[in-house]
């Protein structure tokens, strides 16, 4: 719990530094602001708590705010849904007990695997806890990489994003995609802060990637619900794919990422060419291995 208090304090400090005082509804203030964002007393006033109480929260003191106070702080800081979920998770106002009971190795049930197989002609990734890759269609393997050819412990989307030179050369918008992966992983860590596998992954990435460590220190969270990715594919060239995420009812630890391209676009044509290649070629390109970044 002490680690959670420290993380909550760090997150609150970063969050208030990103809030525009005028957008927060505060009256003009003639005092010079030495740092961007809100002052501690302003957050406290907006949330309806004392400055001393809020200061102790930022200091990581061993106190647990009530659900009402947590909601008030989230409103004061203008947090989005992902940010609110992260703060609630840190103070324990979530379904954390049920999450802790599901720490066993994730495997897809047969019915879900058959559903994924039905998406055979489309790129679909199935991610589990901490962005572990649980399954991928042949098109997803051709579009990104064949995760099945990686060692089991390396089949993780965030790990691949940061420690594989292949990913860095594939994504034309690598920084945007990598930063989103960090923010998603922080959100995951907040849901179950004591999960050892998640913490081990974070420690490894912080130790091996200066970019990951830098973005981790930003304390930002993000839930990927939809978006786009710009790729420079070795076989079909430049293309942009859009994705939608599907979270299964009753199984919040499993997320389907379905990728499409705008009909009639050059990106759609590129996907069609890639689909034909997967049917007539020898399979998806083998992932590069053995680079300094990819070694344990």
Image (cartoon, rainbow, N blue to C red):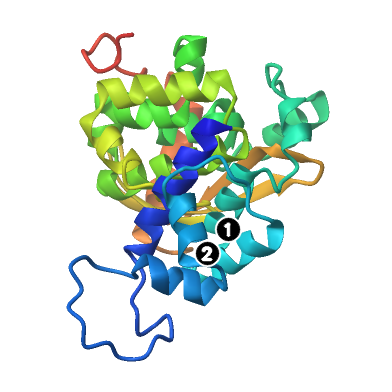
Residue 289 pos. (x, y %) = 30, 12
Q: Is residue 104 visible?
A: yes
Element under disc 1: helix
Depth check: give the residue in front, 152 or 43. 43
57 relative to 98, above or below: below
Q: Quadrant of the N terminus?
A: top right
Element under disc 2: loop
Depth check: give the residue in front, 128 or 148. 128
- Residue at horizontal 39%, vertical 40%? 182
30 relative position to 134: left or right: left
Characterize the local packing of mark 1: few (<14), some (14-19) or many (20 or more) Cα atoms within 10 angstroms. Answer: some
Depth check: give the residue in front, 142 or 185. 185
106 relative position to 43: left or right: right
Give the residue at the far front of this rendering: 52
Q: Quadrant of the C terminus?
A: top left
Residue 116 pos. (x, y %) = 68, 35
Residue 204, label in figure: none
- Splitting the image into 4 quarters, where does residue 171 fall? top left
Depth check: give the residue in front, 186 or 36. 36
Q: Is residue 237 visible?
A: no
**3D distance between C-alphas at marks 2 and 1:** 6 Å
Which residue is under mark 1?
84
Which residue is under mark 2?
80
- Splitting the image into 4 quarters, where does residue 179 fall? top left
- Residue at horizontal 26%, vertical 46%? 175
Residues at marks 2 and 1 touching, judged by CB atoms closer than 8 Å = yes
Residue 109 pos. (x, y %) = 79, 25
- Residue at horizontal 45%, vertical 39%? 6
133 relative to 154, above or below: below
């Amino acid at each position: 719990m002490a680690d959670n208090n420290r993380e909550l304090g760090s997150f609150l400090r970063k969050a208030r530094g990103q809030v525009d005082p005028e957008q927060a509804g505060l009256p003009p203030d003639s005092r010079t602001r030495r740092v961007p964002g809100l002052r501690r007393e302003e957050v406290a006033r907006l949330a309806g708590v004392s400055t001393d109480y809020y200061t102790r929260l930022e200091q990581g003191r061993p106190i647990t705010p009530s659900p009402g106070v947590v909601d008030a702080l989230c409103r004061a800081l203008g947090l989005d849904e992902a940010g609110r979920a992260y703060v609630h998770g840190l103070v324990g106002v979530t379904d954390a007990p049920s999450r802790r009971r599901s720490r066993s190795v994730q495997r897809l049930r047969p019915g879900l695997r058959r559903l994924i197989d039905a998406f055979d002609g489309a790129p679909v990734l199935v991610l589990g806890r901490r962005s572990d890759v649980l399954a991928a269609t042949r098109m997803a393997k051709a579009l990104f990489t064949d995760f099945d050819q990686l060692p089991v412990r390396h089949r993780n989307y965030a790990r691949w994003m940061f420690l594989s030179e292949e990913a860095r050369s594939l994504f034309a918008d690598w920084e945007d995609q990598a930063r989103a992966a960090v923010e998603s992983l922080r959100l995951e860590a907040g849901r179950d802060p004591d999960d050892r596998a998640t913490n081990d992954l974070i420690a490894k990435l912080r130790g091996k990637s200066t970019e990951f460590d830098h973005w981790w220190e930003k304390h930002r969270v993000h839930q990927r619900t939809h978006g786009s990715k710009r790729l420079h594919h070795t076989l079909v060239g430049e293309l942009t794919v859009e994705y939608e995420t599907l979270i299964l009812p009753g199984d919040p630890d499993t997320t389907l990422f379905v990728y499409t391209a705008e009909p009639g676009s050059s990106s759609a044509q590129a996907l069609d060419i890639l689909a034909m290649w997967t049917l007539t070629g020898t399979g998806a390109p083998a992932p590069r291995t053995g680079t300094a970044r990819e070694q344990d």
